[in-house]
Amino acid sequence: MLKGIPPILSPELLKVLCEMGHTDEITIGDGNFPGHTYGRKVIRLDGHGVPEILDAILQLFPLDTYVDKPVTLMKVVDGDPVETPIWDTYKKIVAKYDSRGADCFEEIDKWEFYNRVKEKSCAVIMTGETALYANIILKKGVVVQ
């Protein structure tokens, strides 16, 4: 245990977050996300939801300020009647740590999302999140002391 570190963040995840540099990306996947298919590295945080992990991560690193949209969501597939109220929760969490708030977010096509995870994410954090379309990619910014 360390002081000031959210206890939800495992040593394995802390190592990845520390190793990430400016513009590196990390994905937090919901319980249905095929993390082992698309992730180079998979970190399991079963039993936890995406919002609590998102909040813990954003306590430790900033979002990229050199891009307009450092947070990416998987767009709902056309014709899918799913609602995404969890996105509102994400926007509130991000607004606690970044003054751009909801303006940080972009939505991309499902297959574009999968390809981006495969090509760019340092790791995929697999959660027990049951909300649909709850996957999120974060682009790390510059840490200023």
Image: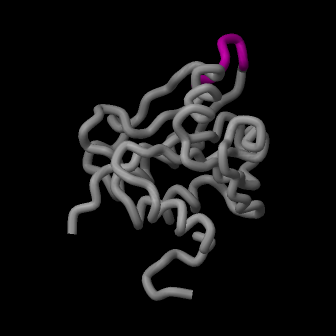
Which residue is at a point 53% across and 68% down the rendered structure image?
A: 14
Residue nearest the viewer, comparing 121 with 54: 121
Can you give x and y, in whole percent of width and height, for residue 126 in the image? 71, 52
Residue drawn at 67 percent across, 42 percent down: 39
Of the pair 143 and 58, the residue shown nearer to us = 143
Q: How many marks?
A: 0
Q: Which residues are magenta?
A: 75-80
Residue 78 lies in the magenta stretch:
yes
Residue 40, x across and y down, in percent: 66, 44
| Residue 112 belongs to the span the image colors magenta | no
Q: Quadrant of residue 96?
A: bottom left
The kind of secondary structure the magenta stretch mainly shows is loop
Residue at the outermost left position: 145
Q: Position of residue 84 (x, y in %)?
A: 61, 34
Image colouring: one colour
Q: Quadrant of residue 87?
A: top right
Residue at (65% x, 20% y) in the render: 111
Which x, y percent locates residue 42? 70, 52
Nearer to me, 35 or 48: 35
Q: Is residue 121 above or below residue 52?
A: above
Pick whichever, 122 or 141, lies toward us: 122
Above or below residue 3? Residue 84 is above
Q: In the image, 130: left or right of 25?
A: right
Along the horizontal axis of the image, is 58 left or right of 115?
left
